[in-house]
Image (cartoon, rainbow, N blue to C red):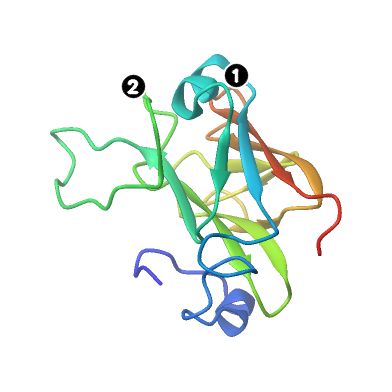
C-alpha cells in the first residue's frame, strides 16, 4: 500500500496489503465497478462510455503542474483541473476491503474534501472514509460545486 494512503485505524486492521485486487483475481473478476461522468468535465476525463475500475486501490487526482513536485505519483484517473484547483494531486481513492467484502472511498487529506452519496469526508470533517453501496453512488471530487461529479456503479447483486 502506498505510504501516502493512511487509512483510519479500523481500515488498517482490515486491509491486507497483499489483497488489493477485487474478487476474482487481478482483473477484477465478477464484481466490476464502473465510473460514469455526471458532468461535462467528468465525462471529459472518462470518455463517454465510462471507466471500468479493475484494480484497487484506485486513485483519483489532478495532473501535477510544473510548480508541483515532479516526483508526485500519477493517479489512476487524472482529472483535467485548472486553477483555482478543486482537486488535489492525489485527492481520493476507491478501496476494496476483502475481509469485509466492501468498497469504500477514502479522501486522502485533500484540501477541499470529497462527497460520497451526500456525505462530506476529508480534512474538514471527522471522517476520511465512506462506504459505497450496491447500485449507483454519487462521488463528488472536491466541494459541492466541483465540476467533477461521477456515478460509481457497483453491481446490485454480488456473486
Left or right of 129? Residue 82 is left
The disc at residue 53 is none
Percent across and percent down for residue 59 are 45, 51
Alpha carbons under labels 2 and 1: distance apart: 16 Å
Residues 26 and 41: in front is 26
For disc 2, the marked residue is 82
Query: Residue 109: in sight, yes or no?
Result: yes
Q: In the figure, 110 relative to 142: above or below?
A: below
Image marks 2 and 1: residues in contact by CB distance under 8 Å:
no
Residue displayed at 81% across by 51% down? 134
Question: Viewer-nearest of labels 2 and 1?
Answer: 1
Q: In the figure, 4 relative to 157: above or below?
A: below
Residue displayed at 66% across by 52% down? 32
Percent across and percent down for residue 48 are 56, 21
> Which of the image's four quarters has the N terminus?
bottom left
Residue displayed at 36% across by 22% down? 84
For disc 1, the marked residue is 39
Q: Quadrant of residue 29?
A: bottom right
Q: Residue farthest to the right?
A: 157
Q: Within 10 angstroms of label 1, few (less than 14), some, or many (20 or more) residues?
A: some
Left or right of 3? Residue 143 is right
Q: In the figure, 60 relative to 30: above or below?
A: above
Q: In the figure, 75 relative to 141: above or below?
A: below
Amino acid at each position: 500500500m502506498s505510504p501516502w494512503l493512511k487509512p483510519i485505524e479500523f481500515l488498517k486492521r482490515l486491509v491486507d496489503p497483499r489483497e488489493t485486487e477485487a474478487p476474482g483475481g487481478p482483473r477484477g473478476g465478477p464484481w466490476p465497478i464502473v465510473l460514469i461522468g455526471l458532468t461535462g468535465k467528468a465525462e471529459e476525463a472518462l470518455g463517454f462510455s465510462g471507466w471500468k475500475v479493475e484494480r484497487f486501490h484506485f486513485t483519483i487526482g489532478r495532473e501535477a503542474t510544473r510548480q508541483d513536485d515532479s516526483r508526485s505519483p500519477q493517479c489512476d484517473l487524472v482529472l483535467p483541473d485548472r486553477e483555482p484547483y478543486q482537486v488535489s494531486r492525489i485527492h481520493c481513492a476507491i478501496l476494496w476491503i476483502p475481509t469485509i467484502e466492501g468498497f469504500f472511498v477514502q479522501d486522502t487529506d485533500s484540501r477541499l474534501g470529497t462527497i460520497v452519496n451526500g456525505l462530506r469526508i476529508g480534512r474538514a470533517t471527522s471522517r476520511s472514509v465512506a462506504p459505497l453501496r450496491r447500485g449507483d453512488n454519487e462521488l463528488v471530487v472536491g466541494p459541492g460545486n466541483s465540476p467533477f461529479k461521477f456515478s460509481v456503479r457497483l453491481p446490485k447483486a454480488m456473486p
